[in-house]
């Protein structure tokens, strides 16, 4: 038996006027997904437990089969794990490259989506000039990490993607002055580079987690492909085989076929389970770009699910779980904690069937998302 978990990040949404009152899932042409849903179990999953922020860190941890209420210590420690950083005696902060206007508005939480090589030069300069008690470590595009002493943790920080087009709310709390100082001083460093960012933004802090390995928890050997350090870090923490895919860039032009093929090859090579996570639908939600969100869903259907299901049939019996980590409504341009549609399919037997849309599962009572992994594996 082979198991696949498909995560179209942030694909759930609300009705959109430009789509005639339909959601992107309802509007998009998704023949493969529709055919899967017709023979699957569909419903709603609560990926974000009460009291936790509706972020990809929390939602993906739940999809991986871990209770975020037990294992989540912050977003940045997960991304630090992807970079193989040692958090002993340290905490990690997410360090975005952002653009904040002179009047204090968060113009771009992604700093123009810089090339990762250029961003690494910026981070190296930050470390050389602002490092010492803290250290800066390059990640992907605008997403980076700062390590700091444990006593830097007492600050309330705001995710920059929640502030787009609004006042950039500075951190508050006992250690916030240190963070604000670094954020302000970073402007002198960034102005020397031709980049769409003009400062850093620090948030998502926390210490390391004691998550158990996936094989110890579920008894199966798993693998993962993703474009982002956050999900890659969860894979590292869980002891999954994490595969890099050329051209997988977490943007609208990502390598869908490469992600599909890495999943197929991982399963052929002996993995029992594979998680494939693609970011584009979430980025479209943050950008408020209706057309790109619809296109991202259609790319999932045509360029991933079509070939993936054919290959799975050749490998023998298989089971699939498909759901986003959270909703990212185009209207809000940020995440919400609302329950999201999920699909659970067994190739050997048809389920009750349904429509994989927000309205199609509206009458279903939400299930606890971190329990779906055990359901997929029939544990």
Image: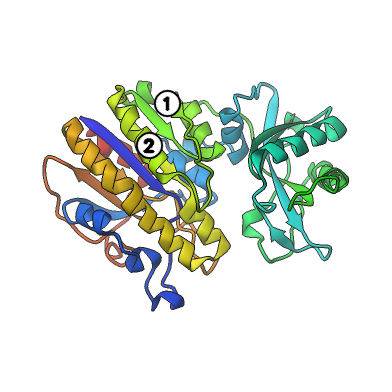
- Whether residue 91 is situated above or below residue 302 in the rendered picture: above
Q: In the rendering, at what x and y percent does residue 112 appear? A: 67, 53
Q: Are marks 1 and 2 in contact (CB under 8 Å)?
A: yes
Classify mark 1: helix, strand or loop.
loop
Q: Residue at x 66, y 43 (%)?
A: 115
Indicate the colouring scheme.
Answer: rainbow
Question: Image quarter for residue 79?
Answer: top right
Question: Image quarter for residue 169?
Answer: bottom right
- 27 or 9, nearer to the observer: 27
Q: In the rendering, at what x and y percent does residue 129 appear? A: 87, 34
The answer to whether residue 86 is visible is yes
Callout 1 crowding tier (Cα within 10 Å): few <14, some 14–19, many ≥20: many
- Whether residue 320 is situated above or below residue 111 in the rendered picture: above
Residue 83 lies left or right of residue 241; in this view the side is right
Identify the residue under disc 2.
Answer: 275
Question: Image quarter for residue 260?
Answer: top left
Q: CA distance from mark 1 to mark 2?
A: 9 Å
- Whether residue 32 is situated above or below residue 70 in the rendered picture: below
- Whether residue 248 is situated above or below residue 300 in the rendered picture: above
Q: Residue at x 50, y 27 (%)?
A: 237
Identify the residue under disc 1.
Answer: 240
Q: Earlier in the sequence, mark 1 or mark 2?
A: 1
The furthest residue to the left: 349
Q: In the rendering, at what x and y percent does residue 19 appear? A: 41, 74
């Amino acid at each position: 038996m082979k198991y696949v978990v498909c995560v179209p990040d942030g694909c759930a949404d609300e009705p959109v006027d430009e789509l005639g009152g339909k959601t992107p899932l309802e509007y998009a042409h998704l023949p493969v997904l529709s055919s899967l849903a017709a023979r699957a179990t569909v419903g709603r999953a609560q990926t974000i437990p009460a009291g936790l922020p509706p972020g990809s860190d929390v939602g993906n941890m739940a999809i991986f089969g871990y209770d975020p209420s037990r294992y989540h210590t912050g977003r940045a420690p997960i991304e630090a794990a992807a970079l193989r950083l040692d958090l002993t005696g340290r905490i990690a902060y997410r360090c975005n490259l952002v653009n904040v206007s002179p009047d204090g508005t968060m113009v771009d939480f992604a700093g123009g989506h810089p090339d990762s090589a250029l961003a690494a030069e910026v981070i190296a300069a930050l470390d050389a000039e602002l490092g010492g008690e803290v250290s800066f470590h390059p990640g992907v595009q605008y997403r980076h990490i700062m390590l700091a002493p444990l006593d830097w943790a007492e600050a309330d920080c705001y995710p920059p993607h929640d502030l787009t087009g609004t006042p950039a709310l500075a951190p508050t709390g006992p250690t916030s002055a240190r963070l604000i100082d670094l954020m302000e001083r970073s402007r002198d460093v960034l102005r020397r580079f031709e980049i769409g960012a003009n400062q850093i933004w620090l948030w998502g802090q926390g210490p390391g987690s004691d998550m158990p390995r996936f094989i110890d928890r579920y008894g199966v050997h798993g693998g993962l492909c993703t474009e982002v350090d956050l999900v890659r870090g969860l894979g590292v923490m869980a002891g999954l085989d994490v595969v890099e895919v050329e051209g997988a860039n977490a943007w609208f032009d990502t390598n869908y076929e490469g992600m599909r093929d890495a999943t197929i090859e991982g399963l052929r090579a002996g993995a029992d389970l594979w998680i494939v996570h693609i970011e584009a639908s979430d980025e479209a939600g943050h950008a408020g770009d209706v057309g790109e969100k619809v296109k991202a869903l259609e790319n999932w259907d045509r360029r991933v699910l079509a070939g993936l299901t054919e290959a799975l049939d050749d490998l023998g019996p298989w089971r699939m779980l498909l759901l986003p980590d959270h909703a990212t409504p185009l209207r809000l341009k940020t995440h919400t904690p609302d329950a999201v549609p999920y699909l659970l399919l067994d190739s050997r037997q048809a389920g009750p069937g349904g429509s994989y849309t927000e309205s199609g599962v509206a009458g279903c009572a939400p299930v606890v998302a971190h329990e779906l992994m055990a359901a997929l594996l029939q544990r």
